[in-house]
Amino acid sequence: MDKITVEKLDLFYGSFQALKEITLNIPANEITALIGPSGCGKSTLLKSLNRMNDLVEGCRIEGSIRLDREDIYGDMDVNLLRKRVGMVFQKPNPFPMSIYDNIAFGPRTHGIRSKAKLDNIVERSLRDAAIWDEVKDRLKKPALGMSGGQQQRLCIARALAVAPEVLLMDEPTSALDPISTAKVEELAMELKKQYTIVIVTHNMQQAVRISDKTAFFLLGEMIEFGETEKIFSMPENKKTEDYITGRFG
Amino acid sequence: MKSAIIQKWKGYKNDPKSFGLFSAVFLAMLITMTALLFVIVYILVKGVPHLTPDLFAAKYTSENVSLMPALINTLLMTALSLLFAVPVGIEAAIYLTEYAKHGNKLVVLVGRTAETLSGIPSIVYGLFGALFFVKYLGFGLSLLSGALTLSIMILPLIMRTTEEALRAVPDSYREGSFGLGAGKLRTVFRIVLPCAVPGILSGVTLGIGRIVGESAALLFTAGTVAEPAISIFDSARTLSVHMYSISGEGLYIEQTYATAVVLLIVVIAINALSDYIAKKFFK
């Protein structure tokens, strides 16, 4: 089952075309990795999936992106879309408030006020993000006092708290140390049972370790898309082979 | 301490240019400090001995130039001016940073205007207030005319400092909030604005400083009646205007210095208070 279908997507920043005719199906309950050198458009594509690109001035989109067959650039309410398609950013960005309030921000946004319900969501989200044991005794402490790795898992928990269907991760481990990276990767593999995950990564080993499908991008075009195993063992395209064997990028 | 200075001297021995620069900046710091300290000490020495209980009597008479009515009026004037200027200034800044498009001509224009406005001498504002609020709108020489004039005067200041405070809030917070499905309103009021409060408060503090210190603009708009204002249409002299009035009469120089001490204390107290609020509630 495809969760997200991207069809003939062209994206422009002003007169610059950042994505060219991207067609891609993202399967549910799998991890799809987007790889490619800097500036290839992989992050741009990721941000189109929950319309974060709307915030960029001069950004224009042609083609369609469908979530469960529904056009996300159509009648869909953008805030509801972002509730269904959560996002974890490259740099951990907890809000300057307590751990508890960070997690509760999303649910409160969507109208949950009851303390008991919020307590419940906070605990469940932190457990799902495998960070509950580390923070359960300091939920009222500022989130900015945590280590970088903990902050990133907190941000994952914060994204989970609004019960999304899809989780977009934009190079979530590029600012983390190896141990925190391993934890986040483990977490992603655990989370795909419940969520559809799309991850942008610079780290090809990471794509191999955790993803089921991989899409390779170059200069705004999708060069190849398929099973991760196949992309990394017998790529069909010469450019893909050059990239994964480290000839450029 | 002493040995550290000697060490420093030795470090500069072979480097006359660095020593020259060091001396220049050190001297500049010394002059600044001395000038400031001199003013404060001078006022205290001249004023404190004349701070008598009579000066705080409820009523001002020509025998006893009590500063109490002026003190009360100063607080009223400050509160009223802030009431007008702070909400508008903050909202304008929110529009400029959060809503207006990047590189928008209006943003540039408003920025230039604000800078120009903050360079205009206060007496010009006073003249405008006298013509517009006092005469044209018929508010008379009153607390209201004075407060409206002052709020126009501090509006650019509050707007600019708020704008800067809002721009200093990292975009990653906004993205995080939007990414969770929060709308613009919630993002601005729950995430961006709370982060900017310390910066906004420092702008408000500067604004208060200008209100409390203003005399020229108020002479034309709020008048010089030395009684606490009962209604906003009463004429009301503030501490600065009070100082101007009694010093001009030539008989109360000592009381003028005493009033200056009180004014100094009011300003320091307000600064300390806003510092305290910023630290207590927003860290």
Image (spheres, coloured by chain):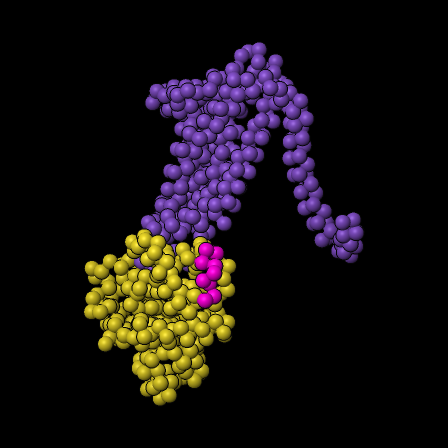
Q: Using the image as rendered, state which of residue A168 and residue A62 is in the foreground.
A: A168
Question: Visible in this render: residue B114?
Answer: no
Question: Which of the 4 image quadrants contains residue B132?
Answer: top left
Q: Residue furthest toward the bottom? A: A234
User: Going 36% across and 65% down the picture, which residue do you hit?
Assistant: A124
> Which residues are drawn in magenta?
A133-142
Relative to A3, A216 lies left or right? right
User: Going 45% across and 62% down the picture, which residue do you hit?
Assistant: A136
- Asked if residue B264 is among those painted magenta in the image, a careful observer would answer no
Q: Position of residue A99 (x, y in %)?
A: 44, 58
Q: Using the image as rendered, state which of residue B268 and residue B104 is in the foreground.
A: B268
Give the color of chain A as drawn.
yellow
Q: Using the image as rendered, state which of residue A31 and residue B130 is in the foreground.
A: A31
B43 up-or-down from A74: above or below = above
- Asked if residue A140 is among those painted magenta in the image, a careful observer would answer yes
Question: Which of the 4 image quadrants contains residue A213?
Answer: bottom left
